[in-house]
Amino acid sequence: MITIKEIADQLGVSATTVSNVLNGRARKMSQETRQRVEEALLRNHYVKEKKNNRGEPQHHLVAVYICLGKKKHVLTDPFCGSLLEGIDRELRKYDRAMVCGTVDDNESFAKVLQNSNLEGAILLGCEAEFCTALVHQIPIPIVFVDSYGEGFDNIGLEDYEGGYEMTSYLIGQGHRKIAFFGDQQPPMGSNLYRFRGLQKAMEEHKLEVDKDDYFYLPQHDNYRHEVLRQFAQNVKESGYTAAFFTSDFLANEAISIFYSQGISVPEDLSVSGFDDNIYARLSRPMLTTVRQKPEEKGKEAVGLLMRRIYGEEVPVGRMRLPTELIVRESVRNLADR
């Protein structure tokens, strides 16, 4: 990080002059000099060093917390792992340290963010209403990831477009009845927008689709596996020829359970996922999926947060990163039959 002396050398003033501006002792300084110093501090992303009660330097800390309800193994999930890696790598460029953890509910975020040592926070998994309340309750800058709503900074994804593109591909492969599997009931956030993308593609091709085509997969392993077993046992009678999962993990797990029920992928049922992480490449057959880049989400979240910390005037808004269709082996072409 740039030093006071280096900024002073840039401007041709003394280090004391820069220090006086930083510490609010610029009353006797000309307005022109003070303005030049303030602009240089902002331009060079300089943040005044904090000290504890003993006068020792404190680390510049950013809280990175994930709220995904009762979902297990959150920090070892490939999506969260890639997101955290992207955040950590980018924070180190700004000489910042990451304080990371998980919470079970939105209200726990507020308690975490009361830590006076925090400069800012990046939060994943908050519901929209709570995001709006939190930005007014907590005095530090906050950037959300994958939250849906207005009035707060959010780095998201083109979930609707990703759902639409995958469904359009499945339809192009001859599939006319497609099941969607999500992990929220009722569908919210990314689940909702991906399912809406499916609905739009089906409607454009004048294919029937309704809420019964959305299958909820509970967090509890036994309940989730039972839903998948029941689907497999009834798949031929139901007429479904393809299943679109909201994550590669769920798709990979389903392929294994389908196989145990005598359903082969893609011969008996085509399967697609969302994320394009390690599960997609380890799956057999390898998974056709929608690619997103969590590390890019992390990078963009840090960039926006640091601009807030530095006091730059940045409009509040949402950024949605693009998705990409990745075709592999798990979808059968029925169009040529």
Image (cartoon, rainbow, N blue to C red):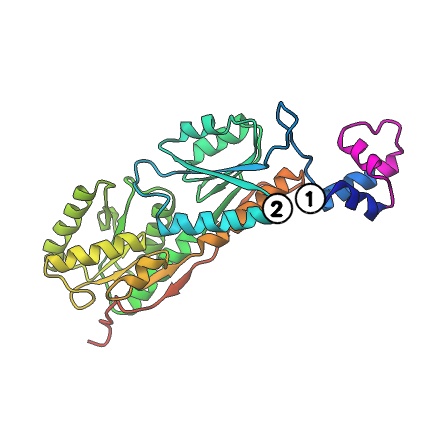
Rendered image quadrant of residue 241: bottom left
**Residue type at the position of mark 1:** His
Q: Which corner quadrant holds the C terminus?
A: bottom left
In this view, the residue in front, 148 or 45, is: 45
**Residue type at the position of mark 2:** Tyr
In this view, the residue in front, 81 or 219, is: 81
Dot label at residue 45: 1
Secondary element under disc 1, as helix, strand or loop, is loop
Mark 1 to mark 2: distance in Å?
Answer: 9 Å
In the image, what residue occupies the spot 83% across and 29% down? 26
Indicate which label's residue lies in the foreground, 1 or 2. Answer: 2
Please say whether residue 25 is one of the residues in the magenta stretch.
Answer: yes
Q: Are marks 1 and 2 in contact (CB under 8 Å)?
A: yes
In the image, what residue occupies the spot 58% across and 45% down? 304
In this view, the residue in front, 261 or 230, is: 261
| Residue carrying label 2 | 94
In this view, the residue in front, 218 or 316, is: 218
Rendered image quadrant of residue 289: bottom left
Is 150 positioned to the left or the right of 75 in the image? right
What's the magenta region?
12-34
* Residue 305 visible in the displayed image: yes
Please say whether residue 332 is one of the residues in the magenta stretch.
Answer: no
Dot label at residue 64: none
In percent of width and height, residue 300 lies at: 54, 50
Is 108 positioned to the left or the right of 25 in the image? left
> Crowdedness of circle 1 by 10 Å Cα count: few (<14), some, many (20+)?
some
